[in-house]
Image (tube, helix red, strand yellow):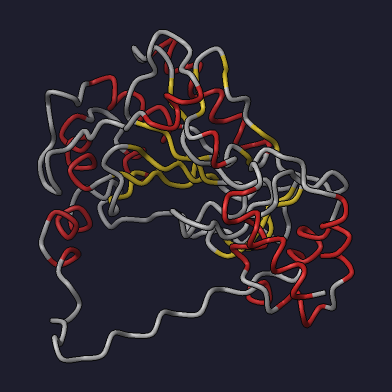
Amino acid sequence: MLRLICFALAFAFAGFQSPLMAQSATEQQALAAMSDKALSKMPAKKVFGAQSVPTHTMKSRAIGFYSKGCMAGGTAIPVDGPAWQVMRLSRNRNWGQPELVALVERLAVEAKKFDGWNGLLVGDLAQPRGGPMTSGHASHQVGLDADIWLTPMPNRTLTRKERENISATLVVKDRKTMDYKVWTEAHARLLKRAASYPEVERIFVHPPIKAELCKWATGDKSWLAKIRPYYGHNYHFHIRIKCPKSSPTCKPQSAPAPKDGTGCGEELAYWMGDIPWKPKKKPDPNAKPPKPAPPMTLAALPAECRAVVTAP
């Protein structure tokens, strides 16, 4: 039985099954029939990556931590809305908790109404049942994270092919310098609006974007505490919202509390310096290549996640 399920999941993972195809009842029944011991040993990213639909028999809730959990009762953000379009549709990662979907939709509408945006291009939220992804993210596992492109939405509906192939535009030249041919005040207004929502826990951006916001902001700057510098967020920003009250087993993240109240001091200086970007130690050219770390198994996730992957 284990060999059969592994083959089925590997087949889906390899791309022979459309990610939008409904998960077969036979496969779900086979997963449910597996012993806890056998199922717990399976790579979590393959189990969750093969799920193409959300749970239909479980209430919406985030289970576990942002980078170690899963999601019951996921809700899909529509791929087209009055002020947004979802990108990379083949990934089937436009799922989240209802609170996250509502917030992204609200941000898009308000950015169009007040901040000079035609609309937003929405990147990854989560897989239909959350959990570890086959590629791309360590977090986005419980339906409370969303990526928003910093590229404005065009004034037309993109085709599916365009949504797969169009590249987002970098708004920085390097890890210290903004590209002012791309960056506008509308970008700053959008990020301030997102940080102003009380549900938002933090927003990740590339370090020079944080530096630019620190220079731009006036008046009450407390919202800047939520804007956190981090690697790789040079063409999009990452919104993370708080654990919903309806999710008692969701593990919250401590609220950001920079010493200066904004994160524009010591924290920003650290990220604009060289330390975060240097290798931890000089590689030994004569050393053997390290063995790859074993993949996270289902056993490493909260126990409730077994019910999530086996539920119809």
Q: In the rendered view, tell whether residue 160 sits above or below residue 292.
A: above
Count of all numbered marks drawn on residues in the image? 0
Horizontal side of residue 185 vs 298, given as left or right? left
Q: Position of residue 219 (x, y in %)?
A: 26, 28
- Residue 190 against residue 154 in the figure, above or below: below
Q: What is the quadrant of residue 196 in the picture?
A: top left
Q: Image check: 239 left or right of 132?
A: left
For the point 84% across and 43% down, the residue is: 56
Point out residue 183 in the picture as x, y percentages from the top left corner.
Answer: 20, 26
- Residue at image location 70% in from the left, 45% down from the top: 52
The answer to whether 32 appears left or right of 176 in the picture is: right
Q: Measured from the top left, where is residue 128 in percent x and y?
A: 67, 45
At a point 86% along the width and 64% down the height, the residue shown is 30
Occupied quadrant, residue 231: bottom left
Q: Please state which of residues 13 and 72 is positioned toward the viewer in this rendering.
A: 13
The percent position of residue 49, horizontal first and vertical second, equals 62, 55
- Is residue 228 depicted above or below 295 in this figure? above
In the image, is 94 to the left or to the right of 256?
right
Quarter placement of the N terminus: bottom right
**Residue in front for this viewpoint, 21 or 191:** 21
